[in-house]
Image (spheres, rainbow, N blue to C red):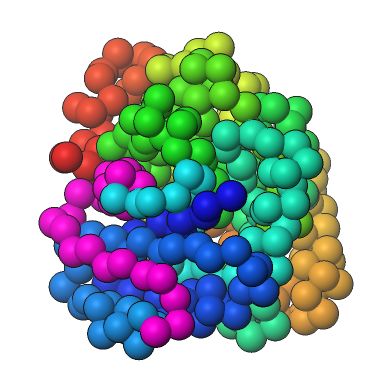
Amino acid sequence: MNFSFIIPVYNRPDEIEELLQSLAKQIYTIPFDIIIVEDGSTIPCEHIVDKYKDKLSITYYLKYNSGPGDSRNFGMSQSKGDYFIILDSDCILPENYLIEVDKSLTTNYVDCFGGPDAMLPSFTSVQKAINFTMTSVITTGGIRGASERVEKFQPRSFNMGISKKAFEASKGFSNIHPGEDPDLSIRLWKLGFETKLISSAFVYHKRRIDWEKFYTQVNKFGKARPILNYWYPEYAKPTFFLPTLFVIGFIIGVFSLVFTFDWILKLYFAYTFLVFIVSTIQNRSVYVGYLSIIAMWKQFFGYGLGFMKSFFKINILKQKPQEAFPELFFKV
């Protein structure tokens, strides 16, 4: 199978350095190529790419800023491969990544797959805490939908594969961001393509993010989901409302204190303590356990409030998604 890696990058030359290092260490013996798409960066990474041209089959493109979805589409349209692997620039691959992908697709071929993210010991404490809340089964993470039926798994574009056939049939990613990856998955299902999780094809997702950026990110995730539910109501799930219900329940719990009714907040305290204990044990660090509490509350409130705002505008006020949230749509 001829794999091509498609990697959009925006002002992150340091990330590309680490990612290319890991690609150069792949023990997969069949040649593969790499497409780097510089999405209108003001801090280019071409000098980093040049360092690896004698080690990897790599092509560099610079284009105006049109968002990660359009940049991925551009990269796939320029590629010579028959199966594209899409990565975020802040990922690092284990050396057997391609072997695991090839083995899984050879055994049970699908035209689109996704893989989970993992953590390296070298990650900062904040990165470990955010990784915990984004992946733990006791938060909203899970393994990016690993509990779903395999044919209805929605790959995420930080670690995602799609065949050339599926790309050409679907026209690739739309201009919504975030939300472009579940949107593509649903359109692929409607076209008759299957998706699956390859749990062994994990990446180390080194999110370079602070608390403010993390909140903004999950808030946008929350805003995008009601738009996807509006476009594809047959794929909406009650579980999508859980973060919003978490927020509403907490507010009710605070107001209930006026009537000395405190059992609701006691449940929130118990859940918070559970997050602390599980993260502390998993990460072997009390400090990371403490930071995981912060990450969990930011995740639930960021996503929940974003979902609530978007649901109100889209479903109650009947606003068009592009007019209600223009910041979620790139012009291409």
Which of the image's four quarters has the C terminus? top left
Vertical relation: 147 (above or below) 2? above
157 and 2: which is toward the camera? 2
Residue 155 appears in the figure: yes
Vertical relation: 155 (above or below) 158? above
Vertical relation: 196 (above or below) 210? above
Q: Position of residue 232 (x, y in %)?
A: 47, 16
Q: Position of residue 259 (x, y in %)?
A: 69, 36
Q: Quadrant of residue 175?
A: top left
233 and 40: which is toward the camera? 40
Vertical relation: 253 (above or below) 134? above
Q: How many numbered marks are there?
A: 0
Please indicate whether residue 303 sits to the left or right of residue 138 in the image. Answer: left
The residue at the point 78 percent across, 75 percent down is: 283
Q: Position of residue 231 (x, y in %)?
A: 41, 17
322 and 253: which is toward the camera? 322
211 and 183: which is toward the camera? 183
Q: Quadrant of residue 284?
A: bottom right
Q: Quadrant of residue 267?
A: top right
Please indicate whether residue 214 sits to the left or right of residue 280 in the image. Answer: left
Q: Is residue 306 magenta?
A: no
Q: Is residue 60 magenta?
A: yes
Q: Which residues are magenta?
A: 54-77
Q: Position of residue 186 (x, y in %)?
A: 51, 24
The residue at the point 62 percent across, 22 percent down is: 237
Residue 302 appears in the figure: no
The residue at the point 50 percent across, 63 percent down is: 32
